[in-house]
Image: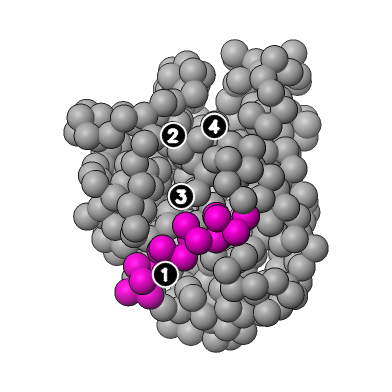
């Protein structure tokens, strides 16, 4: 399951034990994550790490009510990594701290019947180049819950992946002026990955439960897929068209746009147009992960393309790149991923 970019780390036991194993296994990477975000918060939000912690602590009550197991896991993670609980809390609330100021660029798409014979979910995750050294591939085994496979940043307990029930999730960041003292979006992602059905997954993140705006692409091998734009003040869904869903980094729901002011990165619209065209043009019904990586290696609009590369005209603190690519065959419960740009692995037509 997956390319041998990083060894899969298997975590099992109580929430505290799972966290401790995570922290102990990738201690150095967690320290790198903290350093990356401390610098980012300083450069883009103009706050210190301690100030970031104070903002993250505002979410504690909401997390406790949402799922107290997540706090136990973060406690164990901190102990295993030799950092404070507050450090880990800040990492898990990093989108709520940084994403009103820091640009992002991810391209996500999902395919199902009648477009394809199986249900697929794929994306490029674009972010700070330094976080490529903090990637971890986790398998989480919990009593009474589906087995999770996930690519995440060391120290963050929820992100992009799928589970043994055939449910998967992708993420697109949205840059807006909205924030609420609710559940951090990375914990919403974890809750989706603990779901056994599409209906359950949607329920975990609907009704304005999330603390900041984001897009979640949720798919289920048995039930199809849905595109969800979430926020603390409005939540909306976008249904599939002919077994296809796509999303980049701007709001697509008219209802959301009425209430939320956003400042999307300029290339988000052009990338959405490109991925729409590429997905529409797929004429094979029996696809492999390679087919998805070829799409994700597209360089139209380079360097701010689907396969994103650093833009030398931008300040260094604002530059992003594709940190990993992922293709999930939810029907066969198979996750495949590539560390770095897919073009570096021989996909697409190579770098311009």
Mark 2–mark 4 CB contact (< 8 Å): yes
Q: Nearer the viewer, residue 224 or 33?
A: 33
- Label 1, on which residue? 60
Crowd class of label 4 (few under 14; some 14 to 19; many from 20; radius 10 Å) = many
**Horizontal and vertical percent for residue 58?**
41, 63
- Label 4, on which residue? 103
Identify the disc placed on residue 83.
none
Crowd class of label 1 (few under 14; some 14 to 19; many from 20; radius 10 Å) = some
Q: Is 151 situated above or below 291?
A: below
Give the mark, 1 or 2, whose residue is nearer the N terminus.
1
Task: Name the residue rendered at 36%, 29% in the picture.
Answer: 262
Helix, strand or loop: magenta stretch: helix
Task: Name the residue rendered at 71%, 78% in the picture.
Answer: 80
**Horizontal and vertical percent for residue 97?**
50, 49
Mark 1–mark 2 CB contact (< 8 Å): no
Crowd class of label 3 (few under 14; some 14 to 19; many from 20; radius 10 Å) = many
- Label 3, on which residue? 96
């Amino acid at each position: 399951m997956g390319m041998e970019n990083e060894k899969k780390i298997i975590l099992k036991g109580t929430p505290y034990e799972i966290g401790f194993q995570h922290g102990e296994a990738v201690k150095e990477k967690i320290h790198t994550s903290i350093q990356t975000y401390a610098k980012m918060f300083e450069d883009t939000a103009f706050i210190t790490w301690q100030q970031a912690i104070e903002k993250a602590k505002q979410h504690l009550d909401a997390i406790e009510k949402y799922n107290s197991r997540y706090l136990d896991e973060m406690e164990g993670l901190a102990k295993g990594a030799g950092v404070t609980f507050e450090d880990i809390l800040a990492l898990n609330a990093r989108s709520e701290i940084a994403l009103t100021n820091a640009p992002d660029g991810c391209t996500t798409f999902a395919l199902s019947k009648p477009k394809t014979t199986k249900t697929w979910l794929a994306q490029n995750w674009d972010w700070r180049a330094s976080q490529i050294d903090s990637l971890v591939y986790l398998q989480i085994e919990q009593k009474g819950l589906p087995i999770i496979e996930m690519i995440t940043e060391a120290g963050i307990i929820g992100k992009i992946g799928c589970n043994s029930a055939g449910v998967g999730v992708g993420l697109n960041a949205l840059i807006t002026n909205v924030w609420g003292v609710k559940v951090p979006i990375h914990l919403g992602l974890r809750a989706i990955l603990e779901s056994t059905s599409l209906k359950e997954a949607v329920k975990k993140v609907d009704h304005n439960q999330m603390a900041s705006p984001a897009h979640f692409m949720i798919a289920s091998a048995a039930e199809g897929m849905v595109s969800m734009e979430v926020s603390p003040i409005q939540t909306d869904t976008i249904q599939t068209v002919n077994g296809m869903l796509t999303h980049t980094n701007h709001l697509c729901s008219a209802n959301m746009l009425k209430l939320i002011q956003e400042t999307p990165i300029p290339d988000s619209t052009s990338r959405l147009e490109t991925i729409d065209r590429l997905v529409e043009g797929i004429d094979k019904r029996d696809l492999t992960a390679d087919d998805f990586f070829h799409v994700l290696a597209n360089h139209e609009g380079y360097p701010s393309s689907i396969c994103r590369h650093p833009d030398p005209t931008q300040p260094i603190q604002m530059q992003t790149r594709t940190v990993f690519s992922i293709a999930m065959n939810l029907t066969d419960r198979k996750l495949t991923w590539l560390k770095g740009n897919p073009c570096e692995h021989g996909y697409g037509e190579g770098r311009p």
